[in-house]
Image (cartoon, rainbow, N blue to C red):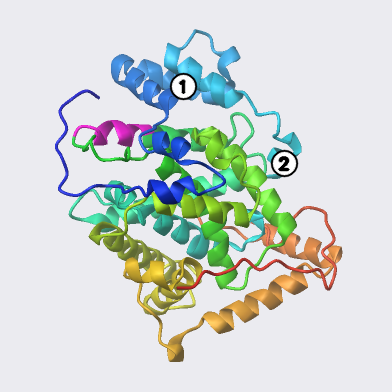
Amino acid sequence: MTANHTPHATRERVIDMETVGRRRTMKADRIAPLLTAGDPLADAVIAEFDLYGPEARRALDAGLRKGLARLDERPPEAVAALLKQVETTPDWVDPLMLHRGDVVSLSVPPLWFGLCSITSALVHACASPAGARQLIRTDRPTPTISRRLVETGVWARQTVRPGGLLRGGPGYVATVEVRLRHARLRAASLTDWNMGAPGLPIGQLDMARTWLGFTLIAFEALAAVGIDITGEEEHHLYRYWSYVAHLLGLDESLYKDVADHADARRLKDLLDAVTAAPDDGPRAATAALVGAQAHTTAHAPGAILPEEQLRDLLHGVLRRSLGNLAADRLGIPGVPAATDLMPLISTVNRQARYWQTFSPASAQAARRQAAEEPGPGPGPEPIAVVLPLGIALQRGTSVHRSATPTA
């Protein structure tokens, strides 16, 4: 990490300290250090992997699945420290919440979870030039983008499933693996990163963008297709994903006060204030993400829309969820009114969700039907269609519609 660094022609990040200083949620003296903050525990594990080789890797794998106390031999120091941190469950975590899983994300039908949640989350992450640079590292970005879509979808479903984040569960293990992948990317990037420019690659602020992608950004995209959630569901969502942030190694100050979409928007505004405007990298990454998702969905079993229409649909979702100004900066084209399917889709989804949550009986029937349908992926994975909270969402219950930003 002390090797010489090749300067970049342009700065990877910019920071408006005056704007940040006016934020009530986090002052400039707090956000500035996070520009160059990584994840010391995970970074140290990567160093031990390089030093000890497969022995350290096997120790971590065993520790994640069995627990630190059940290992036959004491693992290397950094591996032990990371295991101790992820096994220390914060006192605000409700064990029943982990057994239920992310009940809000599980309420989203698999098709829309993939099209809206996964795509918009990755587009938001790569809207930062620093993030896009990590996503497109070759002259042939399409295979990398397609693989990232699949990997992200698998991780997200493992993370939200009931019991997925319990110690040793698939989401628990996969989330720590994502954390270590970030650390590996940081280590690789530092060999040619301009350390004089603010912004560590895949550091705390990039991880915060990723976290917002699967909370605020994903559900603004879902709202664009008529899948709204209530204020109570927002609180469930952020409580669950706060624990995901803990496992990802995110600085607690970035997420501890985020309890709903309004709080998340304030954090997003703060991150946007310290992030450079999109350049050719984010625009290329966005186009590749949309193209790969449209291609994959159009060729999936049971597909009902051709690739071109799916691409238009994704453009419409992203423009409504990100706002016209941000969409223009990312090169996301508008959709002609004559071919825009969004009004019809949002109406159908909103009506379907209303009847599915009309009464406890209808909600139970919808969950039972969804459980019999395999989700997308390598094997059957039932995904509920409505919120499995045991809460009667009676007719006339007010639904908080996530605001869609405009230019």
Where residue 205 sits, quadrant-wise, is top left
Image quadrant occupied by the C terminus: bottom left
User: Which amino acid does the dot numbered 1 rest on?
Assistant: Leu
Please give the name of the residue rendered at 15% of the width and 48% of the height, measured from the top-left corner: 9
Residue 275 drawn at (x, y percent): 36, 51
Q: Which residues are magenta?
A: 183-191
Residue 138 located within the stretch drawn in magenta = no
Q: Is residue 359 above or below residue 183?
A: below
Q: Which element is circle 1 on?
A: helix
Residue 407 vertical position relative to residue 38 in the rendered view, above or below: below
Residue 181, percent from left and from top: 38, 36
Residue for badge 1: 60
Q: Can residue 119 be seen from the camera position used here?
A: yes
Q: Give the left or right position of residue 163, taking residue 130 as reference.
A: right
In the depicted structure, whether residue 340 falls above or below residue 126: below
Between disc 2 and disc 1, the foreground one is 2
* Residue 150 is at least partly visible in this image: no
Q: Is residue 100 above or below residue 337?
A: above
- Residue that badge 2 annotates: 97
Question: Dot 2, crowdedness within 10 Å: few (<14), some or many (≥20)?
Answer: some
Residue farthest to the bottom, as pictured: 338
Viewer-closest of 117 and 53: 117
Identify the image quadrant of the N terminus: top left
Labels in figure, total: 2
Residue 190 highlighted magenta (yes or no): yes
